[in-house]
Amino acid sequence: MFDFFSARRPDTLASRAMIATSHPLATAAGLEMLGRGGLAVDAALAAVAVQCVVDPLMTGIGGDCFALYAPKGGAVRALNGSGRAPAGATLEALRAAGLTDEIPQTSPHAVTIPGAISAWCRLHADYGTLPLDQIFARAIAYARDGYPVTPRVAQDWAANAALVGGDAHAAALFLPGGAAPRAGERHAQPLLADRLTEIAAHGAAAFYEGETASRMAAHLQSLGGLHTAQDFHEGRDQAFWTDPISTSYAGYDVLECPPNGQGLVALLILRILAKFDMGAEMSEADRIHLHAEATKLAYHHRDALIADPASCPGVTDTLLSDAVVDALAARIDMTRALPPALWDEPEHKDTIYLCVVDAEGNALSFINSIFHGFGSTRLDPKTGVLFHSRGASFRLIDGHPNAIAPGKRPMHTIIPGMLCKDGAAVMPFGVMGGQYQASGHAAFLSGVLDLGMDLQAAMDAPRSFATGGELQIEPGVSEAARADLAARGHKLKVMDSPIGGSQSIRIDTATGLLHGGSDSRKDGMALGF
């Protein structure tokens, strides 16, 4: 029986269609499309377009996108909407520009050609039914006329105010009056309304060709970037379909997008966890410790091996092989923490995730990101496009699989997930929070499959994340578990802000009932009918 005194909400239930996002206006926009008879893609695009307006530090049309799409009765397809480096982006060129160790977040070299609009238009062309002007109508209205800033968005906005203030054009838009908007205040992005209107009318060409592309390239060049209008033109069709990768866990198949995303890391963590008894008898401290040790092992290999798929052939088969998994699991000592893996990726990335199941039974797991809070913070004042910072993931090391090169895609942290049973999709799911995402996928699935938790309970459970030589924990972790973990050698850091966020929809194949959850750490919700 649900504890209605717990101060948390139960799963959302519906019988025909459902959408779950991290922002109420995005959920409402997607539900509106479903109510008009639209399919999962129509709802997802309506929701993400709204979120690009109302949650601008987390996502935008100047970002990247990945998706897993499960057509009713068909095989799951993976869509890679990550952007490529400019043709002039060589190691030699970046070193000549003074970069030797890493690519800073705010550098123009952190901007790859955005892939989101290419992915949106590919999805719409292949699986959408409603016209884009209907799909984008709410987003365009919010961008032009304004929208109320929600509490979690306001908190994150304020935390990033000093950073976004470093770019005069971004500051003029995102710090009206010199300060971040507070919860309840209104904000508008009229130039973004113009861009969405153009995309609705002319598709991806409106972003990657013509005046908009030329202006974006010129602005990046003015900052020292290597981007050309031709780079943008070639980005129009850069999104592509591929096959997902998978592993089995607790009687289900877990599907992820293949590299250059870190979905492989989530699968590796799950394979390691499967070597242990993760049932209810395991103590809180043991569960957190085991998850931390598996995370450190898997992420160490991610940083060394995962990159553009052309640069890491065979890495999936190698890392998910029995020999590798057995060797890694054997390294875990339940009595002490392993030395921390070397971390040299940028931290604190920002993303939005959403999922949809439509009335026909199609399921979509969808994620869109500008990487850091406010991405690169570089905003083109003529187009209103805020550019992401995904190129900061590239390495500047000769011979490294993830070394920057012309036309190359960087390693990505954003990963949509899909759970399948007997060949059918039964649960699109995703976790936001940059580096945490792969670790979060494993923790969420373990809660649902090993502990039998409902979706909302699994999302709301206290989180932990082993990163940067410390074990981050949320305040809900018990004092007894904290003492136990410290005794094993973990350097604990109690977080003053939540770790990530998540959404999921589970399909009860016996009854057709849909169970939805949306993380209480964010402003959003799951709604259906």
Image (cartoon, grey):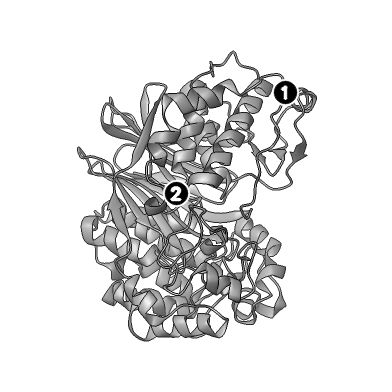
Residue under pointer 2: 261
Seen in the picture, residue 231 relative to 301 is either above or below; the reply is: below
Q: Residues within 10 Å of mark 2 (few under 14, many from 20)?
A: many
Seen in the picture, residue 36 relative to 333 is either above or below; the reply is: below
Q: Position of residue 203 (x, y in %)?
A: 28, 72
Res. 314 image quadrant: top left
- Residue 11 can be seen in this image: no
Q: Nearer the viewer, residue 474 or 46?
A: 474
Give the Cα separation between the discs numbered 2 and 1.
30 Å
Residue under pointer 1: 336
Q: Are marks 2 and 1 in contact (CB under 8 Å)?
A: no
Horizontal side of residue 300 vs 510, given as left or right: right
- In the rendered structure, find residue 202 and report the number of the disc placed on it: none
Q: Residues within 10 Å of mark 1 (few under 14, many from 20)?
A: some
Q: Nearer the viewer, residue 487 or 336?
A: 336
Mark 1 secondary-structure assignment: loop
- Residue 511 can be seen in this image: yes
Which amino acid does the dot numbered 2 rest on? Gly
Q: Residue furthest left?
A: 73
Res. 481 image quadrant: top right
Which amino acid does the dot numbered 1 rest on? Arg
Mark 2 secondary-structure assignment: loop
Horizontal side of residue 94 vs 410, given as left or right: right
Q: Residue at x 41, y 65 (%)?
A: 84
Q: Residue at x 31, y 71 (%)?
A: 204
Query: Nearer the N terminus, badge 2 or badge 1?
Result: 2
Q: Residue at x 64, y 53 (%)?
A: 347
Q: Nearer the viewer, residue 108 or 123?
A: 108
Res. 156 image quadrant: bottom right
Q: Position of residue 126 (x, y in %)?
A: 22, 57
